[in-house]
Amino acid sequence: MLFVPVYIIFIPIFTALVIYLFKNRYINYLALLAQAAITVLLVLYHYTYKGNYGDTLFWFGDWQTIGISLVNDEISESFLFLSVFSWWMVLIYTFEKGKTDHNFLFFLMFLQGVFLGLLQSNDLFNMFVFMELTTIIVTILIAYKKAGDSFRAGIYYLLLNTSGVLMFLIGIILLYNTFGTINVEQIGSLIHLYGEETVIRFSYVLMMGGIAVKSALFPVFTWLPRAHGVAASAISALLSGLVVKGGLYLFIRINGMYAGAAIDYTEFFYWVGAITAVVGVMFALSQKDIKQVLAYHTISQIGIVMMGLSSLHDTAMFYGGFLHIFNHALFKSLLFLGAGIIIKAYKTKKVGEIRGVMRAMPVVSVFMIIGMLSITGAPFFFWFISKSIIKYGIMDSGIKYWILFVVNIGTATSFIKLSQIFFGQKRMTIRLKRLPQRITLMTLAFACVALGNFYIQIGEGFFGLPLQEVTVADWAALFDYALALSIGLAFYKLVIEPDYKPVRYIRNFQMSFETANYLFVVFLVVMTVYFVVL
Amino acid sequence: MDPLLTFIVILVGMYGLSTSKNIIKSVFSVTIMESGVILLFLNLGNLEGGSIPIITQASEIIADPLPQALMITTIVIGSTVTALALMLCIKVFHHYGTVEWREILRRGGGK
C-alpha cells in the first residue's frame, strides 16, 4: 500500500504512452480501465491510512532523509479524490466509440499523472518540475483546437506562467541556500530558526508570486479568460474546475511550510482575494460570450476561495474556502460541459443569439439550472453552506462582509443574464443526443445537490468537521439570498441590458502581455514591501 | 563570481518581459531569466578550490552536487518551453501575419 502514490502517478503516464504507441480503435478503453484501477487503488489507500497519515511518507530508492519523497494528508487526499473524479467526468464526456483522435487522450492522461504528482510531492523541486510540466501540457491542450485565438491564448499562458514558476524556483534556491535541503517537512521543522531573516521573507514573496500567477490572483489573472474561454469545452471544464486549483493547493502547502516563520499573511491575501473576486465579477458582467462569462466567474470564485483560505489553518473560515474549492469544481465543470453542448447545438457562443434552450434541450437545461442555482448560492446547494461559514468568520468586520455581498449581487446579475438563453422561441438546432455526455452532466448535477443536502455527513466523514451549526433554516442568510437576487434583477434590467458605455468599455478592455508582466513585477514589489520591509 | 550579480541577469529578463512588444523577444526574455536562475543556483553550490562532485578519494573537497543535478533538469524543461513557445510563435504568425502582442490582440477582435 505504501507504493500507491507512485502507482497513481505512473499508471496514467504509462497508459498515455501505450495509447500513443498503439493507435487503434480498442485502445481507448484502456484509458477507462486505467482510471478504474487508480480509483480502486486510491480507495484502498484511503482506508489503509485513514487517521494516521504520518505513515504515508514514502522515500524513493531508500535514500532516507536526502531523497525524493511523497506524502499525503487529509488535504492532499481529498484533492486526489477530486482530481480522479474530475478526470472521470472529462473522460466519459469526451468518450466516443472507435474514436481516432488518440493524441488528445495521450495529453489528457499524461496531465492526470503529472497533476497527481504535484498534489503528493513532499519536495520543493519536484513541485517546480510538476508545475512546469502542467504548464506545458495545459498549453498544448489549450492550443489543441488549432485556431488562431487558441494559439494566441496558448503562448500568453505559457510565457506568463513560466515566468511565474521561475520566481517560485528562485524562492526554492534561496531556501536551499539557507537550510541545505529542499524537503518540505524538514524545512518546515527548521524554519522557526531563521523566520525573521530577510532571505526567508524574500523567498516567501517569490513563492507566493509564482503561486499567484498559477492560481490567477488579482493583477495576474489575464491569462485565465483567454485560455479557458477558447479551449474546447471539456478542457475548459477540467482547467477551470481543477487545474487552476493546483495553485490554491500549493498556497495551502507552502503556507503550512512557512508556519514556523510566523508570517502574517491573513490581511494581505484576504484583500487580494477580495479584489480578485470583485474584478472577476465586474468583467463577467460585461461579457457577451458564454464561455468568457464562465471563465471570468472562475476568477471571482477563486477570489472568494482565497478570502477563506487566507484565514489561518485551524479556523472555520479556512474550511469555508477549502470546501468551496470542491463546490466550485463541481458546478463549474457542470456549467462548462453544459455550455459545450449548447454551443455545439447552436453553433454560436454569443449569449444574445442563443434563445429557447428550455424547449430545444429540456434535459440539458435542467442540469444547467442546477449549476446556476449552485453558483448563485441558493439554499439546498453547497455554496450556501460554505458561504455561511466564510460569512461567520468575517461577521465582525463590516466592510469585509459587504464585499462578499457585492460579489453575490454581481454573480446573481450575471447568471440572470445567462439564464435568458432558456427563454424565447425554439430555434432550429442540430440534434445531438449522446448518452455519455448526459451521464456526465447528470452525475455532476447529482453531486451538487447531494453535497448541498448531506453536508453534515460529508463534512464529518471526509474532513472530520462538525457542520451541524450551519443550517438552511437560517432566515438572515435566506433573506440575503433573496435580496441579492432582487437587486441583481434590477441591476440587470437597468444597467447591463441597455449596454451603457462603461459596460462596453470593460468588455473591450484588453491587457497586453507586457502590461500583464509589468503588473506581475509590481505585485512582487508590493509583496516585498509588505512582507520584508514592513 | 558574486551570486548577487546573477540577479542582474534575472532582472534583465524581467525587464525584457515587461517592455518588449514582440513575442519572439518575450521568448528570449524568458530564456535569459532562466539562464540567470541556473547561474544563481550553480554559483551558490560552487566551492572555491573544490573539484567536480565525483568522489574518488574520501578526503577530497568537492562542490555541492545537488544544484548541478537539479539545474540539468531545469535546463531540459527550459529548452522544452522555448521549443514549444517558438512553435506557437510560428503558428500565431501563420494565423495573424504578425508577432506583435498588441497587433494580434487587435486583429483577433476581442479576447
Image (tube, rainbow, N blue to C red):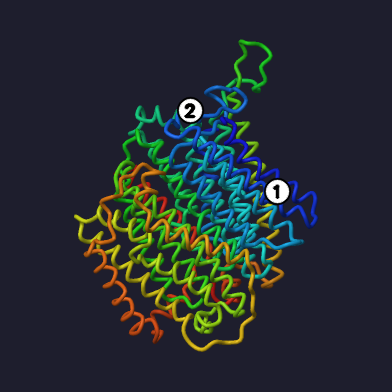
Camera-side residue of B57 and A14: A14
Query: Which quarter of the picture shows residue A381?
Result: bottom left
Q: Which residue is drawn at 69% across and 55% down?
A: A105
Numbered disc 1: secondary structure: helix
Report the side of A522 relative to A364 (left or right).
Answer: left
Q: Where is residue A76 in the image (x, y as percent from the top left)?
A: 47, 42
Given the image, what chain letter belongs to the residue carrying mark 2?
Answer: A
Q: Residue at x 29, y 72 (%)?
A: A484
Count the marks: how many? 2
The extreme bottom residue here reads A425
Residue A55 badge:
2
Type of residue at label 2?
A: Asp
Q: Position of residue A53 (x, y in %)?
A: 45, 32
Q: Residue at x 62, y 55 (%)?
A: B27
Residue A16 badge:
1
Q: Where is residue B41 in the image (x, y as percent from the top left)?
A: 55, 35
Q: Within 10 angstroms of label 1, few (less than 14), some, or many (20 or more) residues?
A: many
> Measured along the vertical axis of the image, is residue A9 above or below residue A366?
above
Quadrant including the C terminus of chain A = top left
Type of residue at label 1?
A: Ala
| Residue A29 in view in this figure | yes
Foreground label between 2 and 1: 2
Camera-side residue of A38 and B76: A38
Numbered disc 2: secondary structure: helix
Which comes before the other along the chain, label 2 or label 1? 1
Report the side of A507 relative to B72 (left or right).
Answer: left
> Measured along the vertical axis of the image, is residue A434 above or below residue A522?
below
Residue A292 badge:
none
